Every structure is written in structure tokens, then in C-alpha cells.
Amino acid sequence: MTSPAEPVIAEPDRRRRAWRSPAVWSMPAAVTLLFLLTGLLTGALVSGPSSELLEVVGLDFSTPYSRPWALLTSGFFAGNLVEYLVAAVLLFLGLCLATRFAGIWRTVLAFVVSAVLSAFLLSLLLEWGLNNDIGWFGYLAGDLQIGSFGGLCGALGMSTAAMDSLWRRRVRSWLLAVTIMFALYLGTGQTIIALVGTIVGIGLGALLLRRSTDHHLRHSSLRETRVLVSTGVAVFAVGPLLSQLSAGFAIGPLSLANQLMLQSIPDKQTLSDICGSDPACITLQDTVGISSPGAVLLTLIPVLLLLVCADGLRRGRRLSWWITLGVQSYVLAFTVFMLLIFYGSSLTDFSSENLGVLFAYIVPTLLAPALILAVLWSTKAAFGVRSSAAGRRALARTAFGLAASLLVVYALAWFAEDNLANSSIEDLLTQLPHLLIPFPLPFDIFLPQGLVSTLLYNFGAAAIWAVILYLLVRDYRRFGGLSKDQAADARQAGLLIRRGGGSLSHMALWEGNHFWFTPDGQAGVAYQVHHGVALTVAEPFGDPRWIGDAARGFVSHCIELGLVPCFYSAPAELGTALAELGFHPLEVAEETRLDVTAQTFKGKEWQNVRTALNKARKLEITDHWGSFSSFSPALRAQIAQLSEEWVAEKALPQLGFTLGGLDELKDESVVCCLAVDETGAVLAVTSWLPVYAKGEIVSWTLDFMRRHPDSFNGVMEFMIACAVKRFQNSVDSISLSGSPLAGTANPEAGEEPQDGMERLLSSLAAALEPFYGFRSLAAFKSRFQPSYRTLYMYYQDSLALPSIALAVSEAYLPGLSGRQRTQMLRQLISR
């Protein structure tokens, strides 16, 4: 019978086959080649089209109706060789993506229509702007425009209609964010054409690729709100830097924002005026002061701060919300102050020219931070993930301590270098805020003259904020929303596991796991948090009727905490409930299950097991069963010694997560089996975890396995055979568990990983194989003629796969030292 998860599991294969189709590459390659050949044959490839050629093929916004063919031909030229190469790469990749989702003819149609329509609509917009004396449009009129970005963005925008809802919203958000940023901060003709082309393309997608309904809920509105707000903050963070780097030709409405957000580096004349033409001052400031290359660090701090806050907003962090609110409030207040000072006189002149400048540049500069503030206030409820108490204390102590230390050290250096002889105490007081605020200040500052005070003045704030940014990023890994009473949660989880669970559910009760329960308490999920990923310990447990609801509720819980949900070592049955949330499966292990009813170990395939049983009988080795606490102190000491010797033989520490150790062996509900010889020596030990359904034990799962190095060959076969005999009168089947990572592709066996995540896990499995032998363990279990059940990892967002890979590695290898990480990395590289 086909399992419900199989159609979902086959979906990645279908996507990979689609990418490999020649049709995806042929048309984009042809268009890109035509673009380059046109430049080569017309002599425009190196230095752009000549003035005569530009007059024919270039788009003239002032007379768009006189040469209508230019609406299309302008898209097949660029300004120089670098622009040709960049445009060719973007054309090929963008058209491949569009063709992959929308097909060839739709992509070509969208490319042509978007290129023509975006240029035409911009011409109409410019005509309106010129008639109404809008200053920005006056700079654009008269320039001959060339470039292919209108058609490219249109094709991409159109193809988003064929993507699933997660990627449709994501690609549209990114595409709109990038084109809006370039249009607002650069404001050149091609940037506006790209923005208009994006909008036209999205509209074409609605016509060409209509879908009746969106069948799958991919993300909650909470996550979408966070993503949209963080995207907006990131755009307005990078935009000022973009306009500063392109100050020579940036004419967008927000092209002045860099002067209001970023520290400016003065030119030689300005530096000479600041220093009063003093050669010593000029040399000092040019070497280590405000005109030195190192001053770029201070310019980047506001951008980095807002980008870190944008990442925090994406995670739902309340601290990032407060910092962004404070920054934007400061920027708005500073903007108002500077505009009143520098533009106060012109604002009283209501001539058409000044009004055009007012509406084109001043009003947008004011509206940008005001708009962000309004959005932040209206979406405050979406950012409720608070830092842990330890994280808040560490951040506050470090920030306050560094700030106070810098102020004190700077003041001492300022006096020691006799700055008071050239300035006053008032100058010192105006310099102190500059040490702590990386944004421009609305008043003139007298620069220090000594070497030490100059270094502190220019690099002190950058150093402090670099440390604060590091603490903010580290704080994202700490959460204050987890349960404060882990013991009570563990007791509740234990009761639910007895009502129902899978073969690995008992592992949920191990130390280090957190728990989430459905509101009615009918089911729960155990999970660990690593690198912002909530990694579950197998499937949900509890009342089987509520398992699907528990999975969906846990996803919502993770989104509220800003975590990435990932179900690890879960069965295929869970795929049905998760498929409607957009989760994708990836095989991570093969669970081996033994039918123990009436098992007699007869037949040729059981020869190894019969040999092991006979050898144990001759050596007078017997199996002893019981809980760890029921054994004598001497036996418990031997078990501990076996475990320590086994761990000591490994180059890496004992694994965790779904692999138990000596501590997990001491659980009273866990049954242990010892192989003891006639002298009382323990030769091997195994542990078995109970599996419940409706309060009754319905199966057992193998966990702990250790053998003495001097024990006879086949001792572990003897242990499994003893377990089969013991359990066959009480349960129908037992599980030998799943070998971690053994279900991934094995390159040595000629198996090729199918996608990026499987490659990562296969590499991890290959690196750990010499140390732990996962695949050797899987081969050993296959001797018992088991049936197999595939265990999957279910993930929702493919962009989170690197974080998930790190989370899986850290879950299995907690507390890995630097030396051990280096050793594992060497092994990984050698393979």
C-alpha cells in the first residue's frame, strides 16, 4: 500500500528533473548570447554604444513617441564591458529561474511586454513630472537610457505566480525590496524601469498563470509580518550606503539620506578648513582621524546595526524592535532639525522650483523614518520574543561598562595631551556624545589634537558598537520563552508518552529537552534549540488522535518564538499533517524492526545467531535482566567501566540527542540486559526503552550497546537473540532503533546525495563514520532479517537548511572542543 507521504517525498525529485531540462537553459542562453553579440557586432561591448548608435537605439524620455522601437532595442545594450558582463550574468540566471517556473513562451512574452511597457509608463510619468516641476524627473529627462533590467525584472515577477506560496511571497518581497531601494536611493532611469517592470511582471503573472486557490498554508501571518518589516528595515539600512557609494550620480528621492545617517569623510578642502590649515592637524586627521581609511568603520556601524536589528526582527525579537525604534526616532528628529537649519530659508520661498525640490527630496526624506516608525508601532505585537535574563544582563553590563570606560579614558587622554590649551571644556562635552552615537550629530565639533585622543575619538565608538553587535547576534541564540519548570513538563510528558508514542518517544524524557504541549494537554512535542532551530526528538507523543494537531500547533509555537521548526527522525505518517504546511521530507535513518512472534532462529540466514548462542552456552555465559538499580554494586561498576572505556576509545566525545549514555541507562522504566560469564564479569550490556500505547507496553527499542573488548565474537548477536526470546511472549515486535545518519547517501557504495541538505548530512555521516561507525552498526542490524521503516527529517524552509545542519551536528555533538572540531574537520576534508 502506498503511504500518504510518498507523493510529498517524490516532489523534490520532480523539481530536480525540471531544473535539468534543456528547455530551462536553452532560451536564457540564446537571449544572453544575443545580448552579447549585439554589443560585439555594433562595437558597443567595450565602451558602450557610440553617440550616433545611442541616438538610434537609446530611449529618450523627452520624446518617447518619435522612436517607439527604442522601447525594446534599448534593452539590448549596456554602458561598458563591466555592465555588459553583469547584465549577461543576471539575464542568464534570471531567465533560467523564470523559465523553470513559467515556461519559455510565457517568459519571452513577459520579458518583451515588461521591457516595452515599463519604459512607456516611465515616459508618461516623466512627462507628468516635468509639467509639474518635480525636480527629480528633471534630471532624468533628456538622458538616453539603455539597459535590460525592465524586461528581466518583469519576467521574474511574472514567474512568481507559478511558485508555491512560500517562494512566491519571498521572491516578490525580495524583488520589490531591491528595485524599490535602487529606485529611491539611486533614482536613475534604469532603476525606475526595473521597479515598474517588476510591478508589470507581477500583474502579467496574475493573467498568464492564474491559480484558483492556494491550497497550502506555508507560513503564518505572524512570520510574514516579521519578514516584511525586517525587509523594509534592511532596505532603509543599505540604501544610505548605496547612495553614499554612488554619490556622483545618485538622484533618487532618498539620495540625501546618507548625509543624515552616515558619518561623512571630508575631502581635502573641508579637512583643511576644519584644521585651520594646520599641517600637523591635517596629517593627524588624514592618517588616523576623520579622513583616514579606518574611519570607514564608523560609517558602516549604522548600516550593520540596522542589518543586525533587521535579522532580529525577522526572528521576532523585542530587543531589536526597541533598538530599531530608537534609531529611526533619532534619524527622524535629526532630519527635522537639519532641514529646519539648512532648508528653512528656501521653505519660505514657494516658487515652483523650490516646491518641486520639496516634494521630490525633502518630503520623502522625512517620510522614510516616519513610515518605519508607524509600521513598527502598528506591528509591535509581532515582536514579543524576549531575550533570556542572562542575555539581557550580559548585554547591559558589557555595553554600560564599555561606554563608561571609553568616556573616562578619553577624558583622561584629552587632558593629558593638553587639548585644553586649544579648546574648552564645552568642546570636550560636545565630543563625548560622538564617542557613543555612531550617527551624525546636529552640531559642530572641535576635533581633538593628540594621537591617543584622536584614535579614541574615531575608533572608540566603532569598537564599542562592534562588541554590542556581536552580543546582539549571540543573544539571538538565547530564549526567554522556554518553560521555567522543566521537571513538571517532564512529568507531564511521561504521562503522555504512556498514552501513545513512537519507538523513539521515550528519548523525549532525557535531559536537555524542552517540551511543548497542546492547549488541552492531549499531546506534546519534545525538542532542543540549536542555532535558532527547534529540533524535535522524533514525532509528537500523546493521544494518537491529536498527533497531527500537535505537529501543526508546534509549528505555530516555533514561529511565535522566532525558531525554525524541524521534525527529526519522524515517521512517514507524520508527513501528511506536515505536507499542508509546506514541509519537505529528507530520509535520515532506517529503523530496523524485528518480528519476535514465534522466532526460532531456524534457517541458513540465522546461522550467525545460532553460532553465537552455542558459543555463549559453551562458555557458560548467561543473560541477566533488570533495571540498572536492581543490579548489584559490582555489576553497576562494571557497566560504568565498560561505558567509560568505550567512550575513551573514541576520538570524539559521546554522542547525544537520540543516543543514550550511562545517565539514560539509570531510568527505572528502562530494561537492561547483561552478558555475564561464570566469574561474574560483564561482557556486554544493552538497554531497551519501552514503547507505549493506551498505557500498555507494545514494543521495546534498543538504545545502549556496549561490549567488553575481550568478549567473544558474536556477543552482540547473543544479546539481541536473548532479547527476542524474552520479549516474544509479551509483544509482537521490537525495534533495533535507527542508526543515526546511516540513512543518508553513502558515496563509498556508489550512492549520490540528491540535494544540498542530503549532501551536508552525508558529509557529516562520512566524517563521523571512522569515529562511531553508524553504517557499520546498520550493517550489523541487517543480520537479523529485519523489516525497515524509514525515518525522515521534515523541514519547511530550504533556506534554513544550513542552520538545520548545524543544529543536527550540535545536537549529536554537544560541547565539542576546538581541538575535536579541528580533528573532525580534517577528517571531513580528507574525505
Image (cartoon, rainbow, N blue to C red):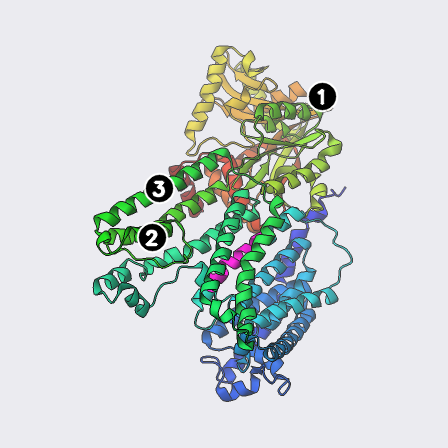
Q: Residue at x 49, y 87 (%)?
A: 51
- Callout 3: helix, strand or loop? helix
Residue identified by numbered label 3: 404
Q: Total number of numbered labels?
A: 3
Q: How far apart are marks 3 and 1 (CA)?
A: 63 Å
Give the amino acid at mark 3: Ala
- Seen as rendered, the residue at the extreme right is 212
Label placed on residue 696: 1
* Circle 3 Cα neighbour tier, 10 Å, few/some/many (<14 / 14–19 / ≥20): few
Q: Along the polypeptide, which appears first: circle 3 or circle 1?
A: 3
Give the mark toward the camera: 3 or 1.
3
Task: Return the residue nearer the eye: 729 or 538.
Answer: 538
Q: In this view, does 52 lie above or below 508?
A: below
State yes or no: discs 3 and 1 in contact (Cβ < 8 Å).
Answer: no
Q: Distance between the residues labelled 2 and 3?
A: 14 Å
User: For the magenta stretch, what is the residue range?
Assistant: 229-242
Give the amino acid at mark 2: Gln
Q: Can residue 474 be seen in this view?
A: yes
**Secondary structure mostly taken by the magenta-highlighted segment of the chain:** helix
Q: Residue at x 74, y 54 (%)?
A: 214
Residue 646 percent across, percent down from the top left = 45, 26
